[in-house]
Amino acid sequence: LSSDILCLATSPSYNSNAQQMSEQEKQRDHHSYYLLAGGVDGRIHQWTVCNNSFPDANVVYAPGHDGRVNALLVCDDLRAAVSIGNDGLVKCWKLDCNESFMERGSVCTINVNDECHSVQDTNTQEAKTQEVSTIKLTCSCILFEQQDLAIIGIGTACGKVLLAEISRDETRDDVMSITLLDERTTVESSSDSIGGCNIHSIASQINHIIISHSKGISIWEPDLHTIR
């Protein structure tokens, strides 16, 4: 187990073989769920919890990120988990109780550093571009979700909030993709924070993103129809 657990998420224990289960097995499955935990060492842990019991021995884990796992989300309609970390990666994991997602591995990954190459320092007389080796991802939330699609917001350590779309292939249930849709610099950098301010947490409400950061709280209302 990781020495420090940084984030948690829960999910129903989806079972694709439910029709073949006995009534007793269905009852047990009805009262079970997944508990996911992200650690400071980059590992993601998964427990199957039954009847609110917490079996320490029933934990599996896999290396998820290079460094801290800062947030975990569960997209119920997609039956998938999403993890973000200090390495700038967004990973999507398929949830299926017939096969641990640790055994399957992540089904898709995107590196935001491939899309966001720089941040602006607007506090100098001449705005200059600061190259960032790794954009650390700090927090996330679900903005929109339907059967084959989810849009999530992602906070960063450089003042940016990103929007990403996670979609499932219409013909293959195990094929997913992640696409960056938009970004917004919520907090400009200051003299004591060249790379911008840290986004601490984000939440969504009716297509708004509420953002807490080093300088207070901001609200972003992205036009999802235009973005998509």
Image: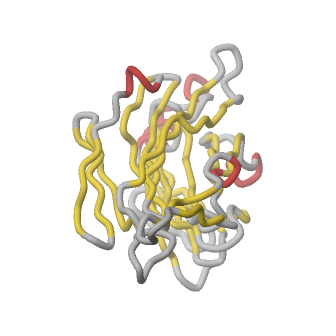
Q: Is residue 164 left or right of residue 92?
A: left
Q: Position of residue 167 (x, y in %)?
A: 58, 28
Instruction: Give the colouring mode of the picture.
Output: secondary structure
- 16 vs 163: above or below: above
What residue lies at 45% left-to-right and 71% top-to-bottom?
A: 124
Q: In terms of depth relative to the viewer, which is nearer, 37 or 205?
A: 205
Residue extending furthest toward the top? 171
Judge whether 83 appears above or below 104 on screen. Answer: below
Which of the pair 65/62 is nearer the observer?
65
Say which quarter of the image contains residue 155: bottom left
Quarter assignment of residue 130: bottom right
Residue 36: x and y, percent? 52, 60
Q: Position of residue 215 (x, y in %)?
A: 27, 71
Q: Is residue 192 above or below residue 204?
A: below
Find residue 180 and report its horizontal and vertical position in percent: 57, 38
Answer with left or right where residue 74 lies relative to residue 218: right
Question: Which quadrant of the figure has residue 65?
Answer: bottom right
Total marks in image: 0
Residue 45 can be seen in this image:
no
On the question of residue 98 being in view, the answer is yes
Residue pictured at 45% horizontal, 42% vertical: 152
Instruction: Give the quarter of the figure containing the N terminus.
Output: bottom right
Q: Is residue 104 left or right of residue 128?
A: right
- In the image shown, does 168 or 159 lie closer to the viewer? 159
